[in-house]
Image (tube, coloured by chain):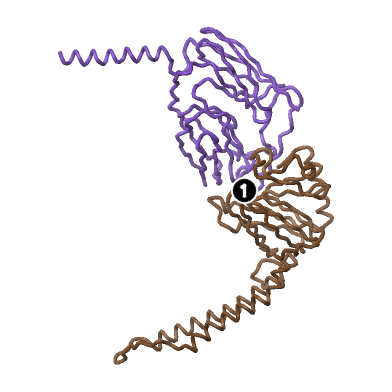
């Protein structure tokens, strides 16, 4: 009898848990909607300044042509490294667990890879030094607690990540002033960074009306409002103008 | 010039070296006398059978002498070097017409701001510092800042012409030091500190931070290029032309 009671209690617990999960899906819903789009750049893209890496032969040796600061990556009118995310519209009480896999930021060739990325609140951050020279990564959070880590050689440092939403949270290297990266810290998984073709996709969205924001380090932000039904895919393009 | 010292490459260098050598000789002789005396006393008054140690108050005249000699020596050195000190660090020491360069120190870099064709350095504000676009905090509202040239880890100076640096620090205390120029000056957060020199020998030197400032202190180095005036003018004109197109580097 006692055994039956224990099984019943566990079963009831599982049912309650399943109902809770169904109400607020943990992560992107499998039948969720998708918002896709492309980010375009109109006008002449500003030239990225050349970087003098003469002080770091190990980094300089990784480039066949002179390295440049990749602040604006535009190809065929499409803009890369734009952080696109759902700014508003998700249920206020929805909770999205952070993935157990950390986001990796690699210092390679005395540049950050990736330069622009998203990370969920509570998701780990893996900081890698592939250069074998001193890097000093500094996270300059205004809402999140800043940190400052020296990595004198090839190594990986695990960080617990960030605690609150912040767009964008800049990173810099104190040793190499040209090194910059930007993280979009989000409480949900509905974010993406545009690739070389300027495209992005926000998948698994529950039905609803959303404000989508696109952020670029040089051209600022743009927003769009999109309404999606369950399983629907909608396009929402953004256009930045180079001045 | 002592062969074991860095090359002399500024107008101050010879005088600084003379003062350094004078102090080294005085302290060297004192060091030898003290150490020899110590060894002699250790041997002469060592423990031996039949000899009993006894307490002595010492000698007042001896104490007065060995206190007065260093004190008088210090005062003489201070008076003798005062002229040089005033020439380098005095309030009115910067020669008229000195070429002005802004120096911004931060962990672990040096940022140099050169006046553009207008010959004037723009106003800077720490609050305007932007890591990606304005590393020294130049005020865009100041017309003098429009043509300023900002360069990372490269100090270019003309030879045969005085140069005055305005030092600032962003985070902790750093120290500007070019051994060949015999110039060292702390850069302190919240202060704008002036230091000047006149390079005499064209060449490439190294600027190092001489104040331990963190993990990357040893990486806080910059190249120093002492040009002839003609070469310097060419470099400045070239940088000014490039700055119009590409911003900082």
Q: How many marks?
A: 1
Up-down: is A129 above or below A241?
A: below
Nearer to us in this view, B136 or B204: B136
**10 Å crowding of disc 1: few (<14), some (14-19), many (20+):** some
Q: Is residue A80 above or below residue A203?
A: below
Pick the residue in front: A133 or B99.
Answer: B99
Across and down, in percent, residue B158 comes to 79, 57
**Could you tell whether B19 is left or right of A23 in the image?**
right
Looking at the rendering, in which quadrant would you find the N terminus of chain A?
top left
Label 1 element class: loop
In the rendered view, does A185 fall on the left or right side of B223? left
When the figure is inspected, residue A92 is found, relative to residue A70, above or below; the finding is above
Relative image position of residue A61 (x, y in whole percent) = 63, 42
Letter of the chain that mark 1 sits on in the rendering: B
**Is B156 left or right of A186, judged from the image as shown?**
right
State which quadrant residue B91 falls in: bottom right
Chain in purple (letter): A
Determine whether, in the image, residue A73 is placed left or right of residue A164.
right
List the single residue furthest toward the left: A1
The chain drawn in brown is B
Residue furthest to the bottom: B50
Q: Is residue B90 above or below residue A115?
A: below
Closest to the observer, A143 or A59 = A143
Residue at point 68%, 48% (across, down) = B111
| Residue A20: image location, x then y, percent | 38, 14
Q: Which residue shows up at 51% across the image and 14% down it?
A: A205
Q: Give the residue pinned by disc 1.
A: B170
Quarter of the image that includes the C terminus of chain A: top right
Residue B209 is situated, as x and y percent measured from the top left of the image, at: 61, 56
Q: Residue at x 55, y 28 (%)?
A: A184
């Amino acid at each position: 009898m006692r055994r039956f009671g224990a099984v019943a209690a566990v079963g009831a617990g599982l049912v309650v848990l399943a109902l809770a999960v169904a109400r607020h899906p943990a992560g992107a819903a499998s039948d969720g909607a998708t918002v896709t789009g492309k980010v375009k750049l109109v006008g002449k893209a500003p030239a990225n300044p050349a970087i003098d890496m003469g002080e770091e032969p190990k980094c300089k040796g990784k480039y066949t042509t002179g390295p440049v600061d990749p602040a604006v990556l535009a190809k065929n009118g499409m803009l890369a490294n734009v952080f696109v995310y759902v700014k508003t519209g998700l249920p206020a009480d929805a909770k999205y667990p952070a993935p157990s896999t950390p986001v990796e930021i690699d210092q390679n060739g005395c540049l950050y890879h990736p330069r622009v990325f998203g990370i969920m609140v509570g998701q780990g951050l893996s900081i890698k030094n592939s250069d074998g020279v001193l890097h000093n990564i500094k996270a300059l959070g205004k809402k999140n607690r800043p940190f400052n880590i020296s990595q004198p050689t090839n190594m990986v440092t695990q960080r617990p990540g960030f605690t609150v939403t912040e767009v964008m949270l800049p990173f810099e290297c104190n040793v190499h002033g040209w090194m910059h990266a930007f993280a979009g810290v989000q409480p949900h998984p509905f974010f993406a960074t545009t690739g070389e073709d300027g495209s992005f996709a926000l998948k698994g969205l529950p039905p609803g009306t959303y404000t989508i924001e696109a952020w670029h380090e040089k051209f600022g932000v743009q927003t769009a409002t999109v309404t999606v039904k369950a399983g629907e895919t909608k396009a929402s393009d953004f256009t930045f103008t180079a001045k | 010039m002592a062969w074991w010292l860095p090359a002399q490459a500024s107008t101050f260098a010879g005088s600084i070296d003379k003062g350094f050598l004078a102090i080294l000789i005085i302290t060297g002789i004192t060091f030898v006398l003290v150490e020899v005396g110590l060894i002699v006393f250790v041997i002469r008054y060592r423990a031996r059978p039949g000899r009993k140690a006894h307490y002595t108050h010492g000698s007042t005249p001896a104490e007065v002498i060995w206190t007065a000699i260093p004190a008088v020596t210090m005062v003489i050195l201070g008076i003798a070097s005062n002229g040089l000190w005033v020439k380098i660090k005095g309030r009115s020491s910067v020669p008229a017409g000195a070429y002005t360069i802004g120096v911004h120190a931060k962990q672990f870099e040096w940022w140099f701001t050169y006046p553009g064709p207008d010959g004037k350095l723009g106003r800077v504000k720490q609050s305007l510092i932007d890591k990606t676009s304005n590393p020294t905090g130049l005020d865009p509202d100041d017309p003098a800042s429009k043509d300023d040239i900002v360069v990372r880890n490269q100090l270019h100076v003309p030879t045969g012409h005085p140069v005055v640096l305005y030092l600032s620090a962003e985070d902790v205390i750093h120290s500007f030091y070019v051994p060949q120029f015999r110039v060292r000056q702390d850069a302190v957060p919240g202060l704008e500190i002036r230091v000047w020199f006149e390079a005499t020998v064209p060449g490439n030197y190294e600027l190092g931070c001489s104040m331990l400032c963190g993990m990357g202190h040893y990486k806080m180095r910059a190249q120093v290029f002492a040009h002839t005036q003609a070469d310097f003018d060419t470099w400045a004109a070239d940088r000014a032309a490039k700055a119009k197109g590409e911003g900082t580097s």
